[in-house]
Image: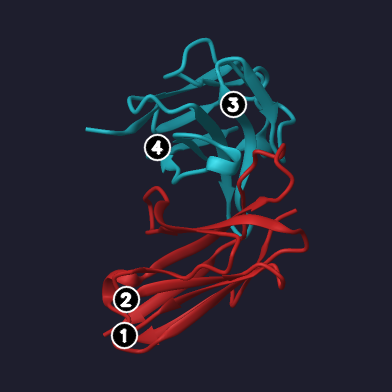
Chain colours: A red, B cyan
Amino acid sequence: QQPVQSPQAVILREGEDAVINCSSSKALYSVHWYRQKHGEAPVFLMILLKGGEQKGHDKISASFNEKKQQSSLYLTASQLSYSGTYFCGTEDSGGSNYKLTFGKGTLLTVNP
Amino acid sequence: EAQVTQNPRYLITVTGKKLTVTCSQNMNHEYMSWYRQDPGLGLRQIYYSMNVEVTDKGDVPEGYKVSRKEKRNFPLILESPSPNQTSLYFCASSLYAGAFNTEAFFGQGTRLTVV
């Protein structure tokens, strides 16, 4: 079952902040975040493992709340280059389910 | 350069004509997978392969076959393509899967149109 991402789309002006959420109905082992620019392949941003670890990548960071089965991606002081579609991918806990299931994506547009 | 290479990038074919989309990675990755991307549906996994000995269905395997005869290659086969298989396809690889999952590297995509 696909994780649910919200919002579906967001429009920002350069310098503004955004939060993208990802939630699952299943217990999660890890959450992955990818960004895809129009006409290109998805590109890896970060992985968060269960344990509530928060990671950062330049001005992009993420958190993982294992109990709530949720992850959030934080984009701070957005730049034009942040525009694209963001996907979360979830890996279920359980050990034998070696599938990375992606959400439907959040389209982020950063305007000057 | 570390990469995942898909071919062809664009393909228009007719219903029922068998086709193969090739995928090759040069990073010695164990795990490879195929996704299709459709507007509003995100990336959906078709098949995945843990290693050359283990291949399994993803979420949308109907109408597709795969083969993993060697570590670096993972072709996607459509025995009898239908218009509902018109989509953008991505191959991806990662060093491991499961508990040791690492980042996935994606190919540049294959845009398939079945008429």
| Left or right: B57, with A105 as reference point | right
What separation in Å lies between label 2 and label 4 (alpha carbons)? Answer: 26 Å
Task: Depth check: give the residue in front, A35 or B83.
Answer: A35
What separation in Å lies between label 2 and label 1 (alpha carbons)? Answer: 7 Å
What separation in Å lies between label 1 and label 4 (alpha carbons)? Answer: 30 Å
Q: Marks 3 and 2: same chain?
A: no
Residue A47 vertical placement versus B20 (above, below): below
Residue A110 vertical placement versus A52 (above, below): below
Task: Depth check: give the residue in front, B46 or B93.
Answer: B93
Which amino acid, by three-letter code, is at mark 1? Answer: Ala
Say how many tags the image has: 4
Q: Which mark is residue B107?
A: 4
Q: Which residue is mark 1?
A: A77
Question: Circle 4 marks a residue in which chain?
Answer: B
Q: Which mark is residue B49?
A: 3
| Left or right: A85, with A104 as reference point | left
Which amino acid, by three-letter code, is at mark 4? Answer: Gly
| Secondary element type, mark 2 | loop
| Secondary element type, mark 1 | loop
Question: Circle 3 marks a residue in which chain?
Answer: B
Identify the residue at image location x=29%, y=70%.
Answer: A58
Quadrant assignment, res B79: top right
| Left or right: A59, with A68 as reference point | left
Identify the residue at image location x=72%, y=37%.
Answer: A96
